[in-house]
Amino acid sequence: MNEILLSPKIDVLGRIVVPSSKSYAQRAIALAGLSQRSVVIHRLVESDDCIAAQSIIKALGAEFKREQDSLFLEKGINFNNDLAIDINCGESGLSTRLFSAFSLLFNQPFKINGEGSITQRTMEMVINGLSQFGKHIKSNESKLPLIISGDVKNYSVEIDGSISSQFLTGLITVAPFLNSDTEIIVNDLKSKPYISMTLDLLKHFGLNCDNDNFKRFYIKGNQSIDLPIEYIVEGDWSAASFMVVAGAIGGRVELEGLKLNTQQGDIAILDAAKQVGAIVRWEGETLIVEKNMLQPFDFDATECPDLFPPLVVLAAYARGKSTFKGVYRLKHKESDRAITLQQECAKVGVTLEINGDEMIVYGNGGGKVNENIVFSSHNDHRIAMAMSLFSIGAEFPVKISDAKAIDKSYPDFYIDFLTV
């Protein structure tokens, strides 16, 4: 069955190597596909999202081989194929929105489909943006599948960045390869760190994008990746956030594979850990997080919404009222995470109030796992990982249903969590 039973964890004490960033990895795979030179990507985690990105560039004609955790690109995407294109992005929101922008590089019909929760998420920002370029889009009431056709006729567009930055990442990735210079005006951009990651990857691949305070992007066309590229994917701060919280509430963890000087916004979990009273320090390239005090805290997660699940658990283990901002960013995730967290935390006596863009967590010292409790992941990888943390200090085992949701981003999470 798709469930796991986690025994009560008396304390946390261990060292792990954090898996590589799936956000960086998907961007690197996409750029590799656009290269006509050799590309090697090291430290690729075999998460569902990364597998989806690899299958997409393969469907577009790229050829590569895998050796352990490395990808060796042998041939880039085939742009001389006149046949209709049909790609499946699995449940990956980033791949869906990123690779939808690849339709700008093709004239033939370009079909994008997906699976699971992504088929229920709105694609309005994709449809609106591609329409401004001159593309025609057929959709299922603004949801997948999308069938995109027509020629690019306009290279100056204006998009809304308030819901997601993923489509903007796609446009910035593709624009250097268009036949004309592109101007993108962005209104109310959230998750700026994710765009910083995209710009960081473009620079590594030798591509240029001018950026005016994340409000206007100007990208010269007819660029190319002219040199062989070798890239090592850095550790994933989103994945690490759960282990940081484990150390802060349960004992001590040592995490390897992370960069302190990173563009990843989820490094902000260290600020939260410090606020709650944990001891956070670096020894060389090893991050150490150690439990000390556990006190309520306030945090603005607007720019890093993926931190909400571990932040809520961190607040649950403190006693008192913690307040978080950025709730509006949670509705269009794998689940409606604000509601999901509210429902699941109630099972251990932790009350969450949701008031517009604000969430209040009334911590009770870690939840009351004094009976057999079954948490549902709601098929959401970050909910599954967050609820697992309630086994720390529990009196009874904790069961997670739909436990394999973690495969989307961190397939070895339970192995690593049992290690610390």
Image: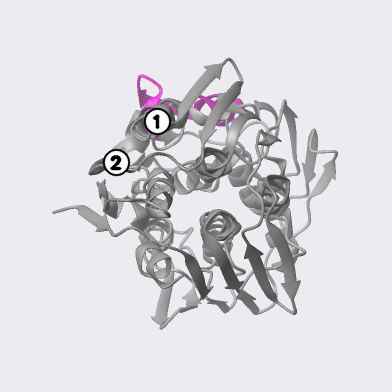
* Residue type for callout 2: Phe
Please tell me how crowded label 1 is: few (under 14), some (14-19), or many (20+) other residues with Cα within 10 Å. some
User: Farthest top residue?
Assistant: 355
Q: Which mark is residue 132?
A: none
Which residues are drawn in magenta? Answer: 123-147
Residue 121 spot, x, y in % from top left: 40, 29
Vertical placement of residue 238 versus 39, above or below = above
Q: Which mark is residue 375?
A: 2
Residue 241 spot, x, y in % from top left: 57, 54
Give SS at disc 1. loop
Total numbered badges shown on the rendered structure: 2
Vertical placement of residue 256 versus 364, above or below = below
| Nearest the eye: 58 or 374 | 374
Q: Residue at x 72, y 51 (%)?
A: 274
Q: In the rendered image, which residue does mark 1 sit on? A: 349
Vertical placement of residue 90 versus 135, above or below = below
Q: Quick check: 86 left or right of 73?
A: left
Give SS at disc 2. strand
Residue 308 spot, x, y in % from top left: 55, 39
Q: Residue at x 55, y 31 (%)?
A: 130
In the image, is residue 139 part of the stretch drawn in magenta? yes
Q: Residue at x 66, y 41 (%)?
A: 295
User: Farthest right residue?
Assistant: 212
